[in-house]
Amino acid sequence: MGAVFMYEIEINRMISGAHQLRDYPGDCVKLHGHNWQITAILEIKELDELGISIDFKRLKKELDAIILPLDHAFLNDLPDYRHQNPTSENIARTLYRELSRRLNDGNVRVARIKVSESPSSCASYYE
């Protein structure tokens, strides 16, 4: 049996952006915007010699680099969303896969990305 992930950390970031949901049967087909909260949850097996799982500074830097192109953008124009709607679900999947590519190393693993488009509505993605 493999090592168990024992620690969990998370960070929250905010972005603002506009989108429209193609073929949606309601108001969301119109151009509109959100202030999205992005939450990254990571699992860690072992701490380093300082007692740190992953430096929050590094985690923030990596997530910020990924979300920067989305901030104050019309998401439908971005390559990831030209052929699929920029829904909270699709944004969460895109961010999950890119952050995983950057950080997963056997000790650290992206567990889940949560994208909240309002205080009462969110979507999560994990693999």
Image (cartoon, rainbow, N blue to C red):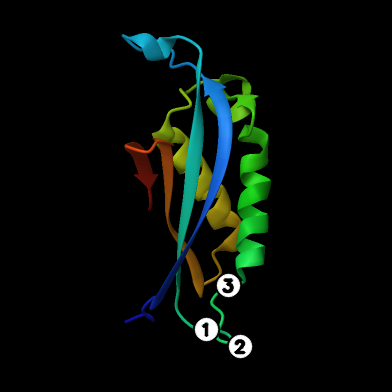
SS of the residue under disc 2: loop
Residue beneath label 1, please? 47
Q: Where is residue 116 shown, x and y percent of the image?
A: 41, 39
Q: Amino acid at mark 3?
A: Ile
Q: CA separation, marks 1 and 2?
A: 7 Å
Residue beneath label 2, please? 50
Location of residue 88 by image quarter: top left
Is residue 93 found left or right of 26 in the rendered image? right
Q: Is residue 50 above or below residue 97?
A: below
SS of the residue under disc 1: loop
Quadrant location of the N terminus in the rendered image: bottom left
Is residue 86 found left or right of 89 in the rendered image? right
Residue at x-position 49% and y-position 45%: 38
Q: CA separation, marks 3 and 2?
A: 10 Å
Q: How many residues crowd mark 1 within 10 Å: few (<14), some (14–19), many (20+)?
A: some
Q: Is residue 7 above or below residue 36?
A: below
Location of residue 120 by image quarter: top left
Residue beneath label 3, please? 54
SS of the residue under disc 3: loop
Count of marks, rendered view? 3
Q: Where is residue 34 shown, x and y percent of the image?
A: 49, 28
Q: Where is residue 110 shown, x and y percent of the image?
A: 47, 60
Q: Where is residue 96 shown, x and y percent of the image?
A: 49, 49
Residue at x-position 58% and y-position 85%: 48
Tell me, yes or no, whether the two marked residues, 1 and 2, touch with CB atoms within 8 Å.
yes
Tell me, yes or no, whether the two marked residues, 3 and 2, touch with CB atoms within 8 Å.
no
